Image (cartoon, grey):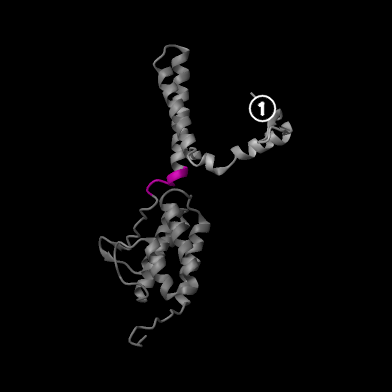
Amino acid sequence: MPTWGDGLLAAGGAPVTIPRDPARDAARDELLNAEYHRHDPTVMERVMTWINDHISNALGSISGEGTSGTTGLVLFLVVAVLIAVALWWRLGAPGRSARTVLDVYGVEGPRSAAAYRTDAEQHAAAGRWAEAVRDQMRALVRALEERTLLDARPGRTADEAAVEAGRALPEHAAALSAAARTFDDIAYGERTADQAAYQLLRELDRTLERARPVLTQAPGGAA
């Protein structure tokens, strides 16, 4: 049987000769055509297949005795960690979509922004930065409620407060979003509370006290 690079016969019987290197390059280019790879598994599918194969091998090894069983257990733990990392990468931090409620209203009822600021300062003086950040964020939101830039509403999250306040104070919308992210990161333990985080919220609270809201135009023409 003739091969690429050997003599082939054209329609008229004349020999056709294709050099080996160009023929090999042409075949490789043809195989790289995307049409041949439409049904190839994705990278994630390949990773999951590899993980499943190793889990099967690990479970088989665990059922063994002596060194084989120990090795299988170690392999199983390694694969479990890889699965967790893959899920984290694919889905993100678990529970991140549910934000922490600010809980501006205590059991005794609404507290003033000044009271929350005092609590935050006391926590900061004692180096309790997580508590200082929490109460300073509450002071910031409560102050906006006292100025009627936010509706007085219990159960509001930091993100909701930032979005709503950003409509009335568009120049500070980005800073409000950053403050909400800082609060959430610390509340979820993804970031360690420190003096810098507390100072960020404290300075923003002071800035917002001097900020003038933007009045929106109602459909009837009244502001």
Residue 94 highlighted magenta (yes or no) = yes
Q: Residue furthest top?
A: 66
The vertical placement of 124 against 51, above or below, is below
Residues in magenta, as a range: 89-95
Q: Residue furthest left?
A: 108
| Nearest to the observer: residue 131 or residue 90 | 90
**Residue drawn at (37%, 75%) of the image:** 149
> Does the rendering let one see residue 114?
no
Label 1 Cα crowd, 10 Å radius (few <14 / some 14-19 / many 20+): few
Q: Quadrant of residue 114?
A: bottom left
| Nearest to the observer: residue 35 or residue 180 | 35
Left or right of 74 on screen, residue 63: left
- Kind of element beneath mark 1: loop
**Residue drawn at (26%, 65%) of the image:** 109
The vertical placement of 202 against 184, above or below, is below
The vertical placement of 14 against 212, above or below, is above
**Residue type at tag 1:** Thr
Left or right of 89 on screen, residue 161: left
| Nearest to the observer: residue 148 or residue 205 | 148
Disc 1: which residue: 3
Residue 142 coordinates in the image, percent (x, y): 36, 68
Q: Quadrant of residue 58?
A: top left
> Does the rendering let one see residue 44?
yes
The vertical placement of 64 against 208, above or below, is above
Residue 33 coordinates in the image, percent (x, y): 58, 42
Residue 194 coordinates in the image, percent (x, y): 50, 54
